[in-house]
Amino acid sequence: MKKILTALLASALAAAALPASAEIVVIVNKDNPASRMFSEQASQFFLGKSAMFTPVDQAEGSKIRADFYQKVADKDPAQVKAIWSKLVFTGKATPPKEFKSNAEVKKAVADDPKAIGYIDKSAVDDSVKVILTLP
């Protein structure tokens, strides 16, 4: 019994020591009139269901990308890829342009009044406007 309690305590401490998932924010150009958005709305832009904004994506395979799609659409990377493959194949949409870093996504959004992207909250500055924070 003591070994089991020790093992449980050790695994609880190990889990507590893991870094918390960083907060992800959805951003738009600072001149964009949008001031806030719900997760369901954001998912529509990033899954090709609306062309009101031009989505800017993080690199395929990145942790922030996987976390973002899980939080806004409850989809894993394979499901998102399947959705976009179908949209591209049928000619209904063009997938979001991908960038390698928060800084590149932020610059792309800052340079395009119709762009919408997502970055780590710690990368936000006054060049973009936050319209949604994902826990």
Image (cartoon, helix red, strand yellow):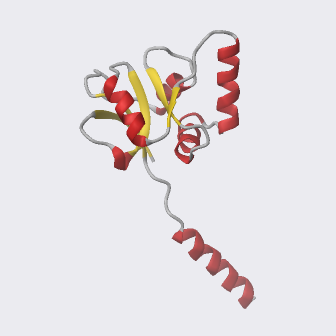
- Residue placed at 44% from the left, 36% from the top? 118
Above or below residue 38? Residue 4 is below
Whether residue 85 is visible: yes
Whether residue 26 is visible: no
Where residue 59 appears, as percent x and y from the top left, is: 55, 38
Nearer the observer, 79 or 13: 79
Above or below residue 114? Residue 6 is below
Q: How many marks?
A: 0
Task: Place residue 62 in its image quadrant.
Answer: top right
Residue 89 placement, left or right of 46 = right
Residue 15 placement, left or right of 126 = right
Above or below residue 69? Residue 5 is below
Nearer the observer, 130 or 2: 130
Where residue 51 appears, as percent x and y from the top left, is: 48, 14
Where residue 135 appears, as percent x and y from the top left, is: 45, 48
Task: Place residue 88 in its image quadrant.
Answer: top right
Residue 108 placement, left or right of 87 = left
Where residue 58 appears, as percent x and y from the top left, is: 51, 37
Residue projecting furthest to the top: 91
- Residue placed at 64% from the left, 31% from the top? 80
Nearer the observer, 6 or 130: 130
- Residue placed at 50% from the left, 22% from the top? 45
Above or below residue 83? Residue 125 is below
Task: Place residue 30 in its image quadrant.
Answer: top left
